[in-house]
Amino acid sequence: MFEVYIQAISKSSEYDSNIGDLNEIIASQQDDLDKKQKSINFGKMTTGLSIALIIILSLLALSLFKNNNLRAKANDLLKDKNIELTLAKEKAERASLAKAQFLSTITHELRTPLYAVTGLTHLLLEEDPKPNQKEHLNSLKFSGEYLLSLINNILDLNKLEANKVEIEKTTFSLKKRIDDVLIALKKTAEDRKNSLNFEFDESIPEKLIGDPLKLSQVLINLIGNSVKFTQNGDVTIRVFKNSSTKDRVNLHIEIEDTGVGISKKKQKSIFETFNQGSLQINRKFGGSGLGLSIVKNLLELMNSKIHLESTLGQGSKFWFDISFNVSESVGDVSNLNNQSYDIDYKALENVSILVVEDNKINQMITKKILEKHKFICKVADNGMDAIKMVHENDFEVILMDIHMPGISGIETTQRIREFNKELPIIALTAVTIDENLDEFYKAGFNEIIPKPFKPEDFFEKIYRTLEASKTTAG
C-alpha cells in the first residue's frame, strides 16, 4: 500500500508539472490571440480611415471639378463682359468725339450769323436811332449777348467734361479781380435795384499765384446768379483768410443774397447740368442751368468744393474755401491781370487793313465797323486773293478768317509768313479757339479775336497788336 501511495504521489507531481506546462502554453496562446486581436482591430481602423480618406479625397476632387467648371464659366462670362465693356467704351469715346465735333461745328455755324446780329445791332445803335428804335435795338443786343453767353457756357462745360481744361499759374490781385467782376455786374444790379456789398479782409496778401480767369468765371456765375434771382435786395460778397503760412494762404469766399432762395429738394440737384431751381424760376428769370455746374467743375479743378445754404423766399448763400500760393515778386500790383487798355483811336486813323473773309454779310459788317473809325479797309474773299493783295499792297495789319473755300486762314497765314515775317496778322474767327491756341500761334498769328466780339475788345486787340509790332520793329 505504501508503494502504491508513493507511486500515486509521484504521478500527481508529474500531473502538476504537466498542468504548469499547459498553463504556460495556454497563457502563451492567449497572448498570441490578444496580439492577433489587436492587429485585427488596427487593420479595421486603418481600413476605416482609408475609406474615409478616399471618400474625402473623392469629395474634394468632385468639388474642385465643380469649382473649375464654375470658374471656367465665370471666366467666359468675364471675357464676354470685358468685350462688352470694351465695345461700350469705344462706343462712348466715339459718341464723345462726335459730340465734341458736333459742338465745334454747330458753334461755328451759330457764331457766324450771331456775328451779323451783334455787328449790325452795334452799327445801327451808332446811327442815332429814334428812341423806340433804340429800345428795340438794345433788346436785340441783349438777346445776342445772352445767346453768345449760352454758347460759351455749353463749350466750357463740354471742355470740363472732356478734361481738356488746365489750371494756369499766374500772379494776380484778388481784390482787383473781384472789383472787376462787380464793375461788370453793376449795371445789372442797378437795373434790378439791388445793392452790391463787398467785404474784403485787408490782411490777405496783395499778390497771389493761381488761375485768375477761372476764378473770375466762378465769381461771375455765382454773383451773377445772386443778382439775377434778387429784386430790391442785397448781394454781399465776403472774402476773409482762414489760415496762412509764409508762402500759402487759405481763403473763405462767400456770396450771400436776399433773393428767392432754393428749396431743400432742389438744393441736392442744383449743381447738376441743365438744372434750375424750378420751372417757374426758369420762366421768370431765364437761364440755361449751366452756370452752377460750371462753378462746381471749375472749383473741383482748383481743389475746392462749392457749398450752399438757402431758405426758400429768404435768400441763398454760396461759399467755398480755396488756397493760393503767395507771390514773392515785388512791384506795382495795381495793374495785375488788368486786361483793359486805353485805346488811342486817333492812332488807328488811316491804318491800312486787309479783311480776309468769305461771308459777304460779315465782310460788310467788319468793313463798316472799321471805316467808322477811319481805317483804310480792303477785303479779300479767299486766301489766294489775300496772298496776292499782300504782295501788291503795303498793309499794316490783316484780319484773317479761318474757314474759307480753297485754302484755310491758317495755310494762308503760313504762306504769307514765307515772304513777310513782320506783318501783324489777327485771326478773326468763329471757331472754338481754346484748344487750338498753339496751332494758331505756330502758324504765325499775332492775336486772336473770336466772333462775335465786343467792339471795345475788337479795337483794343488791334491797337495792342499794332503797338507791339511797332515796338518789335523799333
Image (cartoon, rainbow, N blue to C red):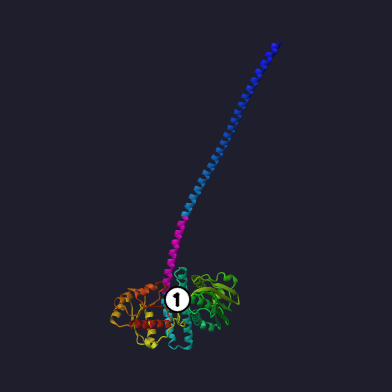
Magenta region's main secondary structure? helix
Q: Is residue 462 left or right of residue 238?
A: left
Q: Quadrant of the C terminus?
A: bottom left
Residue 113 spot, x, y in % from top left = 42, 77
Q: Nearer the viewer, residue 242 or 403?
A: 242
Q: Which residue occupies 55% across, 42% down?
A: 56
Q: Nearer the viewer, residue 248 or 314?
A: 248
- Residue ID for mark 1: 170
Q: Is residue 296 above or below residue 65?
A: below
Asked if residue 471 can be seen in this view, the reply is yes
Q: Residue furthest right?
A: 1
Q: Which residue occupies 48% across, 88% down?
A: 131
Count of marks placed on residues: 1
Q: Residue furthest left?
A: 392
Residue 441 spot, x, y in % from top left = 37, 75
Q: Which residues are magenta?
A: 80-108
Q: Nearer the viewer, residue 140 or 175?
A: 175
Q: Quadrant of residue 116?
A: bottom left
Q: Is residue 51 above or below residue 323?
A: above
Which element carries disc 1, helix, strand or loop?
strand
Residue 260 spot, x, y in % from top left = 58, 77
Q: Amino acid at mark 1?
A: Thr
